[in-house]
Amino acid sequence: MNWLTNFIRPKIRSLVEHQKDVPENLWTKCPACEGMLFQRDLTENLNVCSHCGHHMKIGVTDRLALLFDGGRYETLSVPKVPHDPLKFKDRKKYADRLKEARAKTGREDAIIVGKGTIGGAPVVIAAFDFAFMGGSMGTAVGEGVVTAAESAVKEGAALIVVPASGGARMQEGALSLMQMPRTIVAVEMVKAARLPYIVLLTDPTTGGVSASFAMIGDIHIAEPGCMIGFAGKRVIQETIREELPEGFQTAEYCRDHGMIDIVAHRKQLHETLARILGLLFDKKKTTEKVTPASGASVQNGRSKNGNGKGASSATKARAQKNVRMKARVRKAKMTIKSAANDPASAAPKPRKSSTKR
């Protein structure tokens, strides 16, 4: 026994034992620039790297709170579907995978449907949760998109879909592939009601999701750098045996080649959507009526002139609404592109006085 074992060792042990445990999630490494980010600062910056601007994945509830006015929205329930219709099993049972994903996320499946307002305009949003089995599309996700479309038509609201998915869910086989035409029909129902359909593309949007409802929006918006495509880059290169251009399948590449309309920073998404919806929706709610021509009389909802020819007022109203809706979409796209190219051109110009001297 000496002073090393009697004094020094107990002293060192007491210092080590009473040292506070350092949490493991204090810092996050950016996958793009490999810079170290303090987790609290990263959260305040909406999971966007302060060094290089790389947009990391964000939770689906945080995204909905970011998009809706004041972060307030009402969650809509999605009808339940059979959870394992094919009794699928690979290395693990599909039923067990679902249990693990539900325990991890606290959700029934990979989609959340909420309704609220953006810029004062009524909106229904169907947002994917990538944390739930990679946001893969199964029958429950298809049911969620249909529910969102039906609610938008019922409320007279715009439909916004926020995909973050690797594609169709292979554990449900052909049933997952059936959701592609099913969601297309749901979107067409919204368009038939002359309501806006906007797609907000996030990282990643691939597979059966990009091959169906994600690419038929009236207006497409994307976050910077997000991956958009059907098959992966490596698969395409091995198939065509050619090198693909730099930035292939990124949001900027798709914008430059006409696939999407605008690439917006995550902090600007709410403002961008509010501006678009303000252009597409009438700011003053007016009742649409069809005025009969001079000398005509209205009988049983049909207009008849002196020659005995009749025309349905409802048909005329739908036709006029369709023309106005298309004009608004064209105007919104032109405004967005002009604002992206020249921000000064988006500012209102002073009116010229029409007073004659």
Image: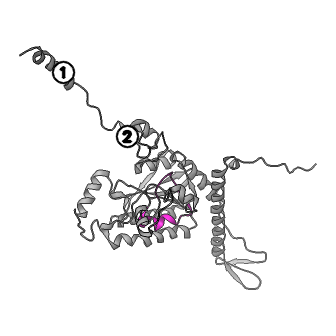
Residue 63 in sight = yes
Residue 28: mark in rendering: 2
Magenta span contains residue 189: no
15 horizontally vs 163: left or right: left
Q: Circle 1 sits on which residue?
A: 12
| Amino acid on which the number 1 mark rests in the picture | Ile
**Residue sticking out furthest to the left:** 1
Residue ID at (32%, 71%) = 173
Disc nearer the start of the sequence (2/1):
1
Q: Residues within 10 Å of mark 1 (few under 14, many from 20)?
A: few
Q: How many numbered circles are shown?
A: 2
- Residue 252 sits in quarter: bottom right
Q: Secondary structure at mark 1?
A: helix
Q: Secondary structure at mark 2?
A: strand
- State the quadrant of the N terminus: top left
- Residues drawn in magenta: 206-227
